[in-house]
Image: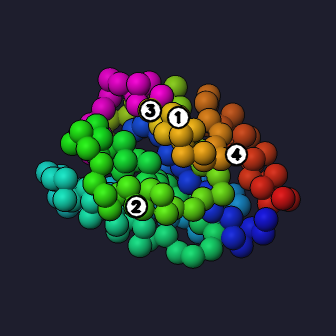
Amino acid sequence: MEKSALRIAFTGPESSGKTTLARWTANFFSLPYIPEFAREYLEEKPQYQEADLVFMAQKQVEWWPQGALVADTEMHVFQIWSQEKYERLDAKIYTELNRQVFDHYFLCAPDIPWEEDPLRENPLDRERLFTIYENELLAHLRNFTVLRGDLQTRQEVIKVIISSLMKA
């Protein structure tokens, strides 16, 4: 696979290292980094409804260019967020979930300390949410690697996986 087409996504529960690792990966491999639209949106509108969640998911997809990228988030995040907060999954999110294409997903384990952030909502059940993410990635037959441990350990795993993808 050529570097010019490599599409990588980071996923997992809140405060599990997604943004730090996505930025590092994009920088290390000289790939475009695509931030999380929801973070920017919610800084301006911290009180949101289900329609806002659907809007954020649609805008996130619009932010993903064709070709190579490292995504700080993806549609499983919106799927699980919707199911947890609203006990349902909007059809638009479901459609985007099934339409998204990434060559590899990195599922970040919540084995690092929680970092307080006014936009985060689930400090006490990250392990339960991690299991949901893992089960969803398996159910959707996603190619993924679980990232555990400290930053350096996670970075070494990312290097090995992405290097092997680039050689494929």
**Residue occupied by mark 1:** 134
Q: Which residues are magenta?
A: 118-131
Q: Nearer the viewer, residue 158 or 145?
A: 145
Q: Are marks 4 and 1 in contact (CB under 8 Å)?
A: no
> Alpha carbon of mark 4 to alpha carbon of mark 1: how far?
18 Å
Q: Position of residue 128 (x, y in %)?
A: 41, 25
- In the image, which is nearer the foreground, mark 4 or mark 1? 1
Q: Amino acid at mark 4?
A: Ile
Q: Nearer the viewer, residue 96 or 71?
A: 96
Which residue does the image show at 60% across and 59% down from the upper left? 102
Which residue does the image show at 38% across and 55% down from the upper left? 94
Q: Can residue 23 be seen from the camera position used here?
A: no
Q: Amino acid at mark 1?
A: Glu
The answer to which image quadrant residue 85 occupies is top left
Judge from the rendering whether residue 132 lies leftward or rightward of residue 85; answer left or right: right
Ranked by sequence position, the earlier of labels 4 and 3 is: 3
Secondary-structure class at tag 4: helix
Q: Position of residue 76 (x, y in %)?
A: 44, 48
Ranked by sequence position, the earlier of labels 2 and 3 is: 2
Which residue does the image show at 75% across and 47% down from the upper left? 161
> Alpha carbon of mark 1 to alpha carbon of mark 2: how far?
20 Å
**Residue occupied by mark 3:** 132
Ranked by sequence position, the earlier of labels 4 and 1 is: 1
Q: Position of residue 140 (x, y in %)?
A: 54, 46
> Alpha carbon of mark 2 to alpha carbon of mark 3: how far?
19 Å
- In the image, which is nearer the foreground, mark 4 or mark 2? 2
**Residue occupied by mark 4:** 158
- In the image, which is nearer the foreground, mark 1 or mark 2? 2
**Residue occupied by mark 2:** 95
Asked if residue 126 is among those painted magenta in the image, a careful observer would answer yes
Q: Can residue 10 be seen from the camera position used here?
A: yes
